[in-house]
Image (cartoon, coloured by chain):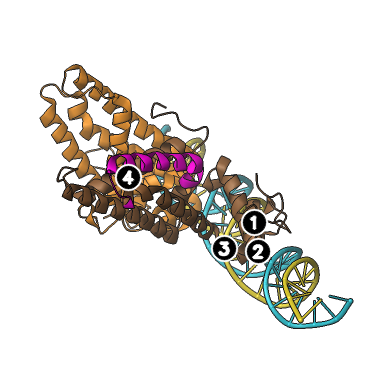
Chain colours: A orange, B brown, C cyan, D yellow
Amino acid sequence: MSAKTFRGNLGHRAAAGEVRPRKSERTRQAILDAALDFLWTRPFRDLTVGELMAMGDASRPAFYQYFSDLHNLMEALLNDLRDEIMAVAQPWFEGEGDPVPLLQETMSGLVRVCYRRGPILRAVADAASADARLEKDWRNFLKTFDDAVAAKIEQEQAAGLVPPLAARPLAVALNRMDAALLIDQFGQRPRGNCVSR
Amino acid sequence: MSAKTFRGNLGHRAAAGEVRPRKSERTRQAILDAALDFLWTRPFRDLTVGELMAMGDASRPAFYQYFSDLHNLMEALLNDLRDEIMAVAQPWFEGEGDPVPLLQETMSGLVRVCYRRGPILRAVADAASADARLEKDWRNFLKTFDDAVAAKIEQEQAAGLVPPLAARPLAVALNRMDAALLIDQFGQRPRGNCVSR
DNA sequence: TGTAAATCTGACAGTCTGTCAGTAATCTTT
DNA sequence: AAAGATTACTGACAGACTGTCAGATTTACA
């Protein structure tokens, strides 16, 4: 699933025909892939720089060529996650026309992304509480989503589709509920099967 | 607010007329109090055994007389919190008569407890992701609450007071939302003022 | 006050982190 | 395809924190 070595690999992002990326870019990606592999089966608290780099064949200090520490690496994972989640939420946020099917599309897309990336999402959330900067990024990510949902709710209230509740508190409450449930359900394997656990 | 020293203090739990507790009990309580003080203003990630014990005048190794590590100490704080929260939730869980005022009483009590203990609640939640055992305790605490709420919902459904939704998923969803919002709002000082932040 | 039990301490070994000067690999230019 | 310049890597180090232990100190109680 991921490169066995950090040395001289192409990195599985390089598609045929692309220019071969700089070595540094390849190695960076290989480290990120190794982290994804690790976090797929083990919690963030068990991740150490040493073990991570031993998954390739590079030395521990090489890690610091690419990331300032493990939390900085998690920031990179969060950025990817944010892009993916924001992309899948676009239909409802910006789509034109009847909002009901758009919302359904967005919600099922959101669940699908969290299903696929659950352990990573969870790892980022876990890591956030151990580092001030990552925590700020995480809160900022949540806030971005809150803002978008609140704006959308207000828009639909103006159209008479949603009762006149305070939009932002409503958005925050629903988002926190969703986030908690998605991380709970898909954050660790074996994955949850509904909330009955 | 807390003892300045761990040595020879009574510990502020000892009320007049009680038998003076054993030294070990007093010291243990003093350490817990120091931890509460610390966590009131600083996040769990900054807490170290050395700094904690330096708040009294005891040496670092003395800590291990009372707790196996910092997460074990957090377990103790969680137990106190659990007792307090469960006590305040009793009116709705077990009260007789019209459930509406009972629920209001419980909810406002819950908010009050979280207002008073917010930073501690948050510290426990943060610490939980860094330690397997504490994480299990935390999930167990949530589950206990989920079970109680689900049972109460079913009971009110039987009385025709709540629509026939799946009780447990409903309970879990509402509890996760509440927990996330309460920790968000009251978990750090200065305290939040509604969700508008 | 004396003494057994309890509590505490300095010193140690272990794990992980982050840095640095020097070495090795890679890329570029000719 | 070899030299030179740049980029990437490494072993070795110092620092922070943890958890333990034998021995010293304090406490409790007769």
Q: Which residues are magenta?
A: B94-122
Q: Are marks 4 and 3 in contact (CB under 8 Å)?
A: no
Residue B136 shown left or right of residue D19 in the figure = left
- Label 2 Cα crowd, 10 Å radius (few <14 / some 14-19 / many 20+): few
Q: Are marks 1 and 2 in contact (CB under 8 Å)?
A: yes
Q: Amino acid at mark 4?
A: Arg
> Within the magenta stretch, is there residue B98?
yes
Task: Please tell me which of labels 3 and 1 falls first in the chain.
Answer: 1
Task: Please tell me which of labels 3 and 2 falls first in the chain.
Answer: 2
**Foreground tag (2 vs 4):** 2
Q: Which residue is mark 4?
A: B176
Q: Are marks 1 and 2 on the same chain?
A: yes
Task: Please tell me which of labels 1 and 2 falls first in the chain.
Answer: 1
Which residue shows up at 27% across the image and 40% down it?
Answer: A178
Rounded to the nearest whole Å, what is the CA distance between mark 3 and mark 1? 21 Å
Q: Which residue is mark 1?
A: B14
Q: Which residue is mark 3?
A: B67
Q: Which residue is mark 2?
A: B21
Disc 1 sits on a residue from what chain? B
Task: Please tell me which of labels 4 and 3 falls first in the chain.
Answer: 3
Disc 4 sits on a residue from what chain? B
